[in-house]
Amino acid sequence: VIQEKRIELSKYPGIEIEAVLEKSAAGRLVEVDPLELRALVSNVVNNAVESYPERTGKVWVIFTESGQRALISIRDRGKGIPAELLPK
């Protein structure tokens, strides 16, 4: 998915997508619907890219674990969600 997103988003040369595999997650086996996971990661990466108005910035896709859970985090330093749209 990460490589596909890099290719798809290459039209924005200022966007960098970095995949980070933390040691704790290496070799971790998970049961997941691959199509749903692909769609989810793709959508959240797209949202992260859209958070950069100038389409210049970095998006991190981080694979880690916590206890018995595998975790995928997607981070950016974009403009974020406007305060009025956040739950109170």
Image (cartoon, helix red, strand yellow):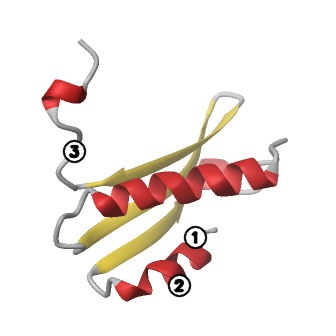
Give the percent coordinates (x, y) of residue 55: 24, 73
The residue positioned 65% from the left and 50% from the top of the image is: 25
The residue positioned 53% from the left and 84% from the top of the image is: 7
Name which residue type carries label 2: Ile
Q: Are marks 3 and 2 in contact (CB under 8 Å)?
A: no
Q: Earlier in the sequence, mark 2 or mark 1?
A: 1
Q: Foreground: 19 or 54?
A: 54
Asked whether residue 88 appears in the rendered view, the answer is yes
Circle 1 residues within 10 Å: few <14, some 14–19, many ≥20: some
Residue at label 2?
7
Q: Earlier in the sequence, mark 3 or mark 1?
A: 1
Secondary structure at badge 2 equals helix
Residue 80's label in the rendered image is 3
Q: Earlier in the sequence, mark 3 or mark 2?
A: 2
Foreground label between 2 and 1: 2
**Quadrant of the frame with the N terminus:** bottom right
Q: CA distance from mark 2 to mark 1?
A: 9 Å
- Answer with the quarter of the image where residue 49 lies: bottom left
**Quadrant of the frame with the C terminus:** top left
Circle 3 residues within 10 Å: few <14, some 14–19, many ≥20: few
Give the percent coordinates (x, y) of residue 72: 56, 46
The residue positioned 48% from the left and 46% from the top of the image is: 73
Residue at label 1?
2
From the viewer's perspective, is 42 left or right of 55?
A: right
